Image (spheres, helix red, strand yellow):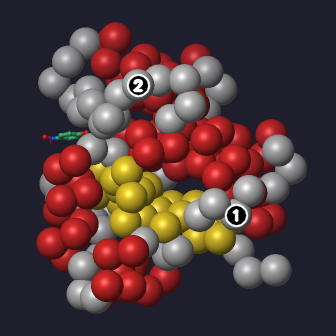
Amino acid sequence: MEKKKILFVCLGNICRSPSAEAVFTGVVKKHGKSNGFEIDSAGTSGWHAGEPADRRMQTHAVKRGYNLTSISRKFNPHSDFDHFDMIIGMDDSNVQNLKQMARSAADLDKICKMTDFSREFNYDEVPDPYYGGSEGFELVLDLLEDACEGLLEKIESKEI
Ligand code: 4NP
């Protein structure tokens, strides 16, 4: 069967979206579904392109068993909209930026927001942790663990 291709997007691609990539990879593995997915992440800015994930984000993630191995890259509207089935922004600004880059109604249809899949948490964004303290990084992981389970559940139940 065709793999479902999922792209997580934030601003810098060094904190939230590489974490989403690692957490969702862990969730699909836990459910024995690794073969069904291609999972990647990107940033709407290219500010940190070529860099590994933020050290602080890596430190918090590794404590929960996630290795953030991805290298930052800028979202490419000319290839990413065609390649991926779902493009998932972390906050409203990411979603707005993605929508501005969409070339067609089909592109727009692929864009959604991470917290649309939350089960336990009632946040409407995954907040940017870059300028804050360690609680922000922990909150990112809490929200992602919850929403990534919700995302897989929705995909498996063919709701999306
Ligand atoms: P991210 O966090 O979008 O979750 O990767 C940020 C990373 C870098 C910056 C802002 C947010 N920055 O301003 O450089």
Picture coordinates of residue 15, whole percent (x, y): 35, 38
Q: How many marks?
A: 2
Which residue is found at the position 53% from the left and 49% from the top?
21
Q: Nearer the viewer, residue 47 or 153?
A: 153
Neighbours of disc 1 within 10 Å: few (<14), some (14-19), many (20+) = few
Q: Quadrant of residue 95?
A: bottom left
- Quarter of the image containing the C terminus? bottom right
- Name the quarter showing ligand 1: top left
Picture coordinates of residue 110, whole percent (x, y): 42, 72
Which residue is found at the position 71% from the left and 74% from the top?
3
Q: Nearer the viewer, residue 156 or 79?
A: 156
Q: CA distance from mark 2 to mark 1?
A: 23 Å
Q: Indicate whether 74 appears above or below 142.
A: below
Asked if the residues shown at circle 2 and circle 1 are in contact, with their CB atoms under 8 angstroms apart, the answer is no
Whether residue 74 appears in this view of the structure is yes
Whether residue 61 appears in this view of the structure is no
- Where is mark 1, residue-wise? 158
Q: Relative to 27, is 58 on the left or the right?
A: left
Q: Is mark 1 within 8 Å of ligand 1?
A: no
Neighbours of disc 2 within 10 Å: few (<14), some (14-19), many (20+) = few
Label 2 sits on what residue type? Asn
- Quarter of the image containing the N terminus? bottom right
Q: Earlier along the polypeptide chain: callout 2 or callout 1?
A: 2
**Which mark identifies residue 122?**
2
Picture coordinates of residue 2, whole percent (x, y): 74, 81
Q: Secondary structure at mark 1?
A: loop
Label 1 sits on what residue type? Lys
Q: Indicate whether 65 appears above or below 67.
A: above
Q: Indicate whether 86 appears above or below 104.
A: above
Which residue is found at the position 22% from the left and 47% from the top?
92
Residue lying at the far front in this picture: please name it: 159
